Image (cartoon, rainbow, N blue to C red):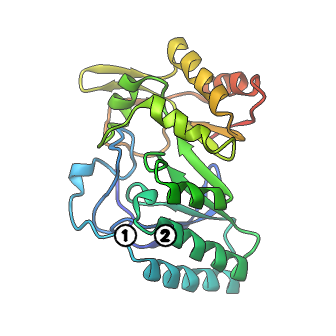
């Protein structure tokens, strides 16, 4: 069953990719606010969670994060990573850069060994302030699920103007200082076959990976409930085969 995160700070949870992760939700706690409406989103469909569209304030995030980090450190269980995720796209926050500055300062003060990570769909990287903030975190994990606009429209359902070509050009501005993340899946949605693991899809995606030249790629498949119930998890064997083709480009690739 898909579900929202009901607080600003959530977890910690054991992340497949990041370790012991303390989550930060900049989006409303009673509704979902995202520039994508992915058919695999663990928070469910956007229109299932319509409500107040108030972002959590920079001050509330800072104060609650200080409280929880202090408690975790005091208990001898500091997080491995502070992860921005939550009920939608975190970089939509109007003061995202300020929140990141506060988080880095708190991390440095209270648990300097922890990493700061952002899980983003890359729809806001046209904003210079967002790019600056993402350069400051340890792991800026940016999504690209397909090289084809038609697949992105089917799988990610962008809520505004989006093209793969423009997104790739913006990703190149990071000059390799990013982690590229891709969800691989198969199934059906809206009467259409979904499969970004075909040779056509993977070959085109690899060409873009080579152009973007990230410092790392993360490939993964379904692990939690999805709003679309006709999707299929891609096997680890298939993911490892894709990862091997990434590493043949000289780019490290992890499989989750």
- Badge 2 element: strand
Q: Tell me which residue sits at (32%, 35%) in the image.
A: 229
In percent of width and height, residue 164 lies at 45, 30
Residue at x 22% of width, y 52% of height: 48
Tag of residue 160: none
- Disc 1 and disc 2 in contact, CB within 8 angstroms: yes
Q: Quadrant of the C terminus?
A: top right
> Considering only vertical position in the picture, is 33 above or below 121?
below
Q: Is residue 99 left or right of residue 75?
A: left
User: Label 1, label 2: how many angstroms apart (C-alpha)?
Assistant: 8 Å
**For this view, does 37 lie left or right of residue 108?**
left
Q: Residue at x 75, y 74 (%)?
A: 112
Query: Which element type, helix, strand or loop, lies under badge 1?
Result: loop
- Of 92 and 251, nearer the camera is 92
Where residue 156 appears, as percent x and y from the top left, is 37, 37
Q: Quadrant of the rendered structure where residue 30 is?
A: bottom left
- Relative to 138, residue 225 above or below: above
How many residues crowd mark 2 within 10 Å: few (<14), some (14–19), many (20+)? Answer: some
Tell me if I can see residue 76 in this picture: no
Which residue bears the numbered disc 2? 10
Percent of width and height locating residue 57:
40, 77
Characterize the local packing of mark 1: few (<14), some (14-19) or many (20 or more) Cα atoms within 10 angstroms: some
Q: Nearer the viewer, residue 126 or 33?
A: 126
The residue indicated by pointer 1 is 6
Which quarter of the picture shows residue 239? top right
Q: Is residue 133 above or below residue 242?
A: below
- Residue 87 visible in the shown view: yes
Residue 85: where, in percent of width, then height?
48, 58
Which of the pair 19/211 is nearer the observer?
A: 211
At 70% from the left and 21% from the top, the residue drawn is: 245
């Amino acid at each position: 069953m898909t579900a929202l995160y009901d607080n600003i700070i959530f977890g910690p949870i054991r992340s497949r990719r990041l370790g012991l992760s303390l989550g930060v939700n900049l989006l409303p706690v009673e509704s979902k606010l995202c520039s994508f409406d992915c058919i695999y989103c663990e928070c469910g469909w956007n229109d299932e969670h319509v409500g107040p569209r108030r972002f959590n304030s920079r001050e509330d995030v800072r104060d609650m994060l200080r409280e929880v980090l202090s408690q975790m450190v005091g208990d001898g269980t500091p997080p491995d990573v502070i992860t921005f995720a939550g009920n939608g796209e975190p970089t939509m926050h109007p003061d995202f850069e300020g929140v990141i500055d506060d988080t880095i300062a708190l991390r440095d003060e209270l648990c300097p060994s922890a990493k700061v990570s952002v899980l983003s769909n890359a729809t806001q990287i046209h904003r210079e302030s967002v790019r600056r903030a993402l350069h400051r975190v340890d792991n800026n994990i940016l999504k690209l699920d397909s090289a084809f606009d038609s697949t992105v429209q089917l799988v990610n359902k962008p809520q505004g103007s989006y093209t793969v070509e423009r997104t790739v050009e913006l990703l190149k501005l990071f000059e390799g200082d990013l982690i590229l993340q891709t969800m691989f899946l198969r199934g059906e949605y809206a009467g259409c076959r979904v499969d970004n693991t075909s040779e056509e899809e993977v070959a085109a995606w690899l060409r873009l990976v080579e152009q973007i030249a990230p410092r790392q790629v993360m490939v993964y498949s379904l692990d939690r409930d999805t709003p679309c119930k006709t999707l299929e998890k891609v096997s680890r064997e298939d993911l490892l085969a894709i990862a091997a083709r990434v590493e043949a480009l000289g780019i490290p690739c992890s499989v989750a």
